[in-house]
């Protein structure tokens, strides 16, 4: 089986608009939560979220093009172009049919949906924009990335709720291993901080309502956790075979050595209480990597700060890792970024990759009182330096979709 490595990274997050800024904020334990600025939250149960800070699309994309993209698409395009630049690939020297894109979104263009539905109600169907559907659909970010950069290889989107971008990375790896492409751009993006999204998640009782202290609201594993904090942003990876990266002298960030996917087959929104689907995904990833559980040093968990979800995942980890669970470093970077839904998997994979690069575990912030049922090291409040050879990232979505990736420290050339 062909070895696949990461050679480019791009990220837009609520705590940093580049990989370097993102990592620095993780090390500082910085929260991205603040009162929502995008709409009037007077009648909402939740009035805060993790918005991108100081983001202006026209600093990255010409205004005409930006105006024809929903924010989720803008974020995806920008993160992909960051990753392509970081990879050092000379696109003019590559057969364009050999570089592809798999880029997903859990929800798609919710901002344009909100705007155009209001336009329809106020001014009638003839005033709905001809760009409404192309801006709305969740595959259009993948399309825009290919159009803007002339990438003519395999091109499509994944949509599996909060496992979306993990599945995008998995698909991209398999396309390389099957020989259908030489290079892949993969990841996901989300811009869900809209009136309808927040109202919907509030109705589902999924969001924290800690309106008096937004920066303290995302608190995975804390006994007082009360739901997740919505976030927005995007992440992208450029991946290629190990042989290709060595041949062109590329910087290798990490190797993708294991992948696992499964379904809970249990409930529309709740995880299996014993984490059976999560167990299956992690076990499959370990088997693919050809390693025993004791080789894993760090797990970036799904860790959304929902009462049921946090416990189910920790139960799954303890089942899979046995006695080694007590030696793992575990953390949830959602405590800082909020939950980026379809973009969560790739952004948290980037956190794993940077943890391998820096041999440091990002913290779980806002852990004032660890839930007594969570008796493993969840890295409370401050980062931890330790040797990390293998890092694992979990992502689980509504519908029971599960994904797991294992990254290995960059191999010597």
Image (cartoon, rainbow, N blue to C red):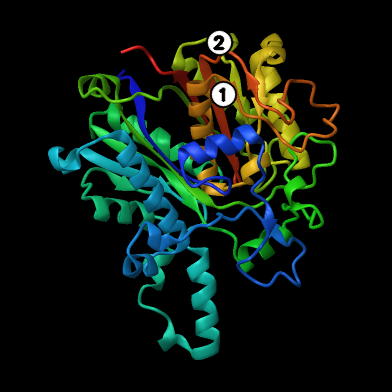
Q: Residues within 10 Å of mark 2 (few under 14, many from 20)?
A: some
The kind of secondary structure element at disc 2 is: helix
Of tags 1 and 2, the one toward the viewer is 2
Please tell me in which quadrant of the rendered image residue 409 appears. top left
Question: Could one spot residue 273 in this view of the protein?
Answer: no
User: Which residue is rendered at x = 67% and y = 30% of the image?
Assistant: 363
Q: Residues within 10 Å of mark 1 (few under 14, many from 20)?
A: many
Which of marks 2 and 1 precedes in the sequence?
1
Where residue 369 appears, as percent x and y from the top left, is 85, 32
User: What whole-number distance in Å separates the C-alpha atoms at marks 1 and 2?
Assistant: 13 Å
Is residue 170 toward the left or the right of residue 2 in the image? right
Q: Quadrant of the C terminus?
A: top left
User: Which residue is rendered at x = 72% and y = 57% of the image?
Assistant: 204
Which of the pair 238/169 is nearer the observer? 238
Residue linked to disc 1: 282
Task: Please say if 69 is above or below 84.
Answer: below
User: Which residue is rendered at x = 53% and y = 39% of the image?
Assistant: 22
Q: Which mark is residue 295?
A: 2
Is residue 96 toward the left or the right of residue 133 in the image? left
Which of the pair 239/160 is nearer the observer? 239
Where residue 144 appears, as percent x and y from the top left, is 31, 56
User: Which residue is rendered at x = 67% and y = 47% of the image?
Assistant: 269
Q: Quadrant of the N terminus?
A: top left
């Amino acid at each position: 089986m062909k070895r696949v490595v990461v050679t480019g990274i791009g990220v837009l997050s609520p705590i940093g608009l580049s990989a370097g800024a993102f990592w620095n904020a993780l090390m500082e334990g910085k929260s991205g939560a603040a009162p929502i600025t995008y709409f009037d939250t007077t009648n909402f149960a939740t009035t805060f979220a993790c918005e991108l800070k100081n983001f202006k699309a026209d600093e990255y994309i010409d205004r005409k093009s930006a105006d024809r993209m929903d924010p989720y698409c803008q974020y995806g395009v920008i993160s992909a172009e960051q990753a392509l630049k970081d990879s050092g690939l000379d696109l003019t020297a590559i057969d364009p049919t050999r570089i592809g894109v798999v880029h997903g979104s859990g929800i798609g263009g919710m901002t344009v949906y909100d705007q155009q539905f209001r336009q329809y109600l106020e001014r009638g169907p003839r005033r709905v924009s001809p760009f409404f559907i192309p801006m709305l659909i969740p595959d259009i970010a993948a399309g825009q990335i290919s159009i803007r950069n002339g990438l003519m290889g395999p091109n499509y989107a994944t949509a599996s709720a909060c496992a979306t971008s993990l599945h995008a990375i998995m698909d991209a790896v398999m396309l390389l291993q099957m020989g259908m492409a030489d290079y892949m751009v993969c990841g996901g993006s989300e811009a869900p901080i809209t009136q309808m999204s927040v109202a919907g998640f509030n109705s589902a009782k999924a969001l924290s309502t800690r309106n008096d202290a937004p920066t303290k609201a995302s608190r995975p594993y804390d006994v007082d956790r009360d739901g997740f904090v919505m976030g927005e942003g995007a992440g992208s990876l450029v991946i290629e075979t190990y042989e290709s990266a060595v041949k062109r002298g590329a910087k290798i960030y990490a190797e993708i050595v294991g992948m696992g996917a499964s379904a809970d087959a249990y409930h529309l929104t709740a995880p299996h209480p014993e984490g059976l689907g999560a167990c299956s995904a992690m076990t499959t990833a370990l088997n693919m990597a050809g390693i025993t559980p004791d080789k894993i040093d760090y797990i970036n968990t799904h860790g959304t700060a929902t009462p049921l979800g946090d416990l189910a995942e920790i139960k799954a980890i303890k089942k899979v890792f046995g006695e080694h669970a007590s030696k793992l470093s575990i953390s949830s970077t959602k405590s800082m970024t909020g939950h980026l839904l379809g973009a969560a998997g790739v952004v948290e994979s980037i956190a794993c990759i940077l943890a391998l690069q820096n041999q440091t575990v990002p913290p779980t912030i806002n852990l004032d009182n660890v839930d007594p049922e969570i008796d493993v090291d969840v890295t409370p409040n401050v980062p931890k330096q330790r040797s990390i050879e293998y890092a694992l990232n979990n992502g689980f979505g509504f519908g029971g979709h599960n994904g797991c990736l294992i990254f290995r420290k960059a191999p010597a050339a």
